[in-house]
Amino acid sequence: MDLYAELILDHSKRPHHAGLREPFDAQTYHVNTSCGDEVTLRVRLDHTDSEPVVADVSYDSIGCSISIASASILAEETIGHTVPEALETFEAMRTMLTSRGTDPGDEEIIGDGVALAGVSRYPARVKCALLGWSAFTDALARAGADISAVSHGSDHPEPTTTS
């Protein structure tokens, strides 16, 4: 088994930051209507610096190993970073995942997210990998963060959301 497959399995079997925690600034619920994967995601922002910082991301995810691993990677790669840095990570992940194999990802930006590069060759699985990220950007917006730098393409799962 290669290193990337091991990373995906590790994140799916032992997801980091899983479980819904309080306090939080916003909560979203998204469903991938293609396969039924679900995620409820909470975000808490720290506004003490000039740029808001992602203080916590917690989630409850039901779905395939790719969906769960991606949510785990999302939490690892965004907590402690400013919102603009977290959005840069999101954009890099989305670019890699929608590249159909032409973008191997930048480990400096997406960390363990590079393990999901192979998903880009399977369009039906891209929505699984992007589900948590879509919920994350939705939660950031609901928490009052400026996400205007994010382009909203058609590659997002059809979300069902709640506050």
Image: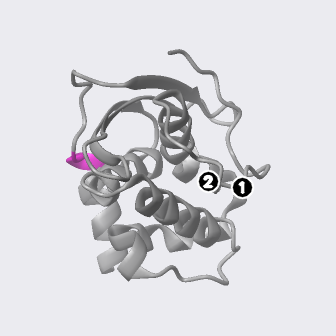
Residue that numbered label 2 is attached to: 125
> Which one is in front, 10 or 139?
139
- Which stretch is magenta? 12-16
Question: In the visual, does 106 lie left or right of 146?
Answer: left
Q: Position of residue 156 (x, y in %)?
A: 69, 45
| Res. 151 mark | 1
Amino acid type indicated by mark 2: Arg
Question: Among all residues in the image, which is located at the extreme top?
Answer: 162
Name the residue located 51 percent from the left edge and 47 percent from the top edge: 133
Q: What residue type is labelled 1?
A: Ser
Label 1 CA crowd tier, 10 Å (few <14, some 14–19, many 20+): few
The part of the image, by quadrant, that contains residue 45 is: top left
Q: In the rendered image, which quarter is residue 107 located in? A: bottom left
Nearest the viewer among 49 and 82 is: 49
Which colour style is shown? Answer: one colour
Q: Magenta segment, principal secondary structure?
A: loop
Tell me which numbered mark, 2 or 1, is placed earlier along the sequence.
Answer: 2
Of the pair 143 and 132, the residue shown nearer to us: 143
Q: In this view, does 98 lie above or below 70?
A: below
Q: Image check: 36 left or right of 58?
A: right
